[in-house]
Amino acid sequence: MARSVVSSRHVYLDLAHPDVAADVVIQGDHVEAVLPYGRADRSQAGEVRDFGDDFVCPGFHDAHQHVLHTALFPSSLADRYPGTSEADCVERLRAFALAHPGDGWLISQGWRSALWDPAVPPTRDSLDAAFPERPVAMCSGDLHTLWLNTAGLRALGIAEDAEPPAGGIFDRDANGRLTGVLREAAGMVYTARVFSQIPRGELLSIYGDYFQRMLAQGVTSVCDMALSAAPGADNVREDVYEGLLADGRLPMRVNMFPQLVGNFDRIQSLQARLTGPVLRAPGMKQFFDGVSSAHTAWLTEPYANPYFPGDCGRPTVDPERMRELVLGAASRGIAVRIHTIGDRAIHTAIGIFREAYERYGAPRQGANSLEHLENLLPGDVQALRDAHLVASVQPQHIVIDVTQPDRDLGPERASLMWPFASYRKAGVTMAFGTDSPCVDPLSMEVLGCAVTREDPRTGEPRGGWLPSERIPMDVAIDAYTRGSAVVAGRADELGTLAPGMLADLAVFDHDLMSTPAERLGDVQAVATYVGGALAWER
């Protein structure tokens, strides 16, 4: 097996060794040794790359992505645009349609009505005026809502008297007429039906482009997370991955987390046959609530700006049913990751997982986790650790709209949101990701938002939103490498650079440990290695 050496004066090995001058000796696909800089026997190496003052670290691991959606938005098949208003989004889609003629679906993603002026939900009427015959599917920025025109409703078989899937909502106007807006499970189920019509050949093409985009960010592993609370709509495409793997065209590691719906045949089959180093299925995922900006996150007390008396949101899955699902998985040694944003969803889920751990112990592979965790009850930071849960969080979410938490939750509840420093103090393992395409999958933004809690584009709010919860760069890198490997059950082989670990490395043109936070936007990847092989180079 070929031996190679990657050297730099700035190597991040792990949290205890964040900036050392080192030679990383690679044998085959593993790290054989880590030696002081310049000490490796280069005469025995087939290839030697000395990156000088460039920064070398373990490959980043995005712990929470929706890969089909990230590959699709943007691509030649769909548009991505947040818009400033309903009319602006419609006009943007008109232009996209001119470049994509035909009678098939027009697909886009990105709108957030809470950020529009006026901040009101859209309706199908504006889309009908522009597209009276061609079906339109517009996914919201957070992927929890789908906006359809009448032709789209018709193509999906949604009649005026239709009932939404369990856990979903069909918006209706004052006269009871469908507005074309489908929320939570309803939006996710019907989005999956639209996407299921994309030809396999086109899917393979956009997945290939997606892998190159990720490698260019220094991302070598990703967790592909189910995006639905309902059966048959999770968009985790093992058929695509296994086909690419068989053809030798899967250039980075993928960990699949299909939906948890009570039947374990699929996950057990995946785990039985996917035991190699590239493609795995460590566990399952489910939704417990929605998002606070739409008042669908499940709260202990009503929203600060309630839509109706007693407006606390609601669970998307009945709590007792969620308990049955989690305990059923735990009894089989299967890890579970649950979307929880509201404080009541978080608190209830912690109790369920505590029971699961006490009865069945840790999963065989992967780790149980809560996803997103936007607002917590004060005691639940420590409770996460006591329940052996990973906090799977997305730093860029902090600055999507820094005015939203106060508006929807009030200042007291907003004061304990995305508490990264509190997690660190309590000993809670953090796993960093993006939730792409809800935000852009840009690695320097992940790190920058965790370190500064400022918008990387505007620098606002100055000093950071809730600055006491900022963390240093070495801790942020640890969460984006080792922490994400923990939640995927791969910390024994990924996430740090040490003898015996898989040789996944990312190289950047600035020393991340000394680069000022405001300069992180200038940092570019130089090279990315997966299993010791050069997978991408600028």
Image: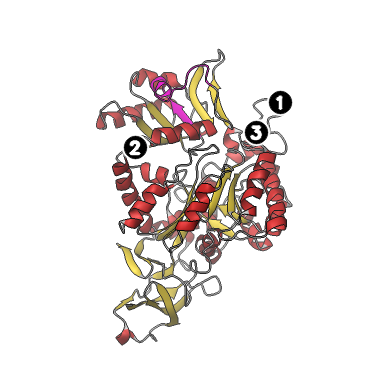
Q: Quadrant of residue 389?
A: bottom right
Q: Which mark is residue 367?
A: none
- Report x, y in % for residue 383: 71, 55
Q: Which mark is residue 198?
A: 2
Q: Confirm whether residue 382 shows in the render.
A: no
Q: Nearer the viewer, residue 184 or 13?
A: 184
Element assignment for label 1? loop
Magenta range:
145-162
Residue 456 sits inside the magenta stretch: no
- Where does label 3 land, which residue? 313
Mark 1 and mark 2: span between their CA atoms? 43 Å
Q: Residue at x 42, y 46 (%)?
A: 237
Give the mark, 1 or 2, whose residue is nearer the N terminus.
2
Q: Is residue 70 left or right of residue 199?
A: right
Callout 2, which amino acid? Ile
Q: Residue at x 59, y 47 (%)?
A: 338
Give the mark, 3 or 2, whose residue is nearer the N terminus.
2
Q: Residues within 10 Å of mark 2 (few under 14, many from 20)?
A: few
Q: Residues within 10 Å of mark 1 (few under 14, many from 20)?
A: few
- Where does label 1 land, which residue? 309
Callout 3, which amino acid? Gly
Disc nearest the viewer among 1 and 2: 2
Q: Is residue 477 above or below residue 187?
A: below
- Quadrant of the image containing the N terminus: bottom left
Callout 1, which amino acid? Pro
Q: Residue at x 43, y 63 (%)?
A: 276
